Image (spheres, rainbow, N blue to C red):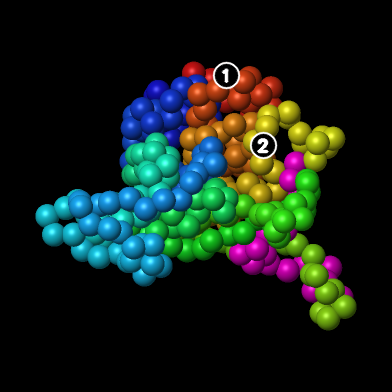
Amino acid sequence: MHWNADGPDLVAAGDNLPILRSLPGSAFSVVYLDPPFNTGRARQMERVRGTRVSADRGEIGRIEPASGERLGFRGQGYRVTRERTLAYDDRFGDYWDFLEPRLEQAWRVLAPDGTLYLHLDYREVHYAKVLLDALFGPECFINEIIWAYDFGARTKRRWPPKHDNILVYAKHPDHYFFDAEAVDREPYMAPGLVTPEKAERGKLPTDVWWHTIVSPTGRERTGYPTQKPLGVLRRIVQASSRPGDWVLDPFAGSGTTGAAAAELGRRFMLIDENPEAIEVMRRRLAGAAPVFS
């Protein structure tokens, strides 16, 4: 895969890991990852180097230096944290073995003022937060965005889960780009409590985003099963990139990231190994005329 900052938008078919490794460093202002969610895990205790690992919150979450072991990007004891966290659930270990090298590459290709968005749900986000703190450095954590929606079946055995989690990390904690004023505003929940001018303009979003899923009968729908709403990706691209910046999505699916980037005047590179996803993107992004490879 040949990527050129002055070249065309790109859609690459194939395993994203070797493609990511072929890209130059510090090239993308936004990297958005929406990997397959890891479901159906059973929690259990494991042994790490012959010692019992406690499920205590402090034990699992502690980040400490590891003498003689590989350090994280910010000098933290990554291996110790990783082993303790993954030992808590070996099935998550398999999932993280898949995701970890892709996140390492995502960090590498981020611009110095770039931002990473990792889209998960309640099943994995707690593990991922601990490990990303160790991998990137806890000072690089910016936000946990809650994307809340209200659609679909409702269980009566617990509070129905109706949200996803998006972890936001900066390449550099003091120099990342963020433009709140560029973001689409949203209605006030109590417009009568503000002036008519404020109510008309709307308010800046917080870290809780109320946004419907893609309607099964709406014009936006492509038919791809994991399609994310354009409004969610618009907000990410608006806030963390400038016109002309490059945006990368290694798990592109239906191509929503590319559609948002094209609409907002950003450049994009999308990767997916599913032939169905490539065909959906070929139809959906025809107007942007990316190069498919």
Q: Earlier in the sequence, mark 1 or mark 2?
A: 2
Q: Which residue is mark 2?
A: 227
User: What segment is highlighted magenta in the picture?
Assistant: 196-214
Q: Say which of 237 and 84 sits in front.
A: 84
Q: Are marks 1 and 2 in contact (CB under 8 Å)?
A: no
Amino acid type, residue under disc 1 in the picture:
Pro
Mark 2 neighbour density, 10 Å: few (under 14) some (14–19) many (20 or more): some
Residue 226: numbered disc: none
Q: Is residue 178 left or right of residue 129?
A: right
- Is there any visible trace of residue 262 in the rendered image? no
Tell me the residue at 50%/29% (across/down): 271
Task: Measuring from the top left, give residue 183's x and y in whole percent.
Answer: 65, 58
- Mark 2 is on which residue type? Gln
**Residue at coordinates 65% horizontally, 63% vertically from top-left?**
208
Q: How many numbered discs sit on the rendered protein?
A: 2
Residue 22 appears anywhere in the view: yes
Residue drawn 51% across the image and 63% down it: 143
How far apart, in angstroms, are the residues tagged by discs 1 and 2? 15 Å
Q: Quadrant of the N terminus?
A: top left
Secondary structure of the residue carrying numbered label 2: loop
**Residue 202 included in the magenta stretch of the image:** yes
User: Few, some or many C-alpha atoms within 10 Å of disc 1 (few <14, some 14-19, many ≥20)?
Assistant: few
Q: Position of residue 191 (x, y in %)?
A: 84, 74
Answer with the quarter of the image where residue 189 lies.
Answer: bottom right
- Residue that carries the numbered disc 1 in the rendered image: 275
Is residue 210 highlighted in magenta?
yes
Toward which corner of the image does residue 141 lie, by quadrant?
Answer: bottom left
Residue 62: horizontal and vertical position, in percent? 32, 66
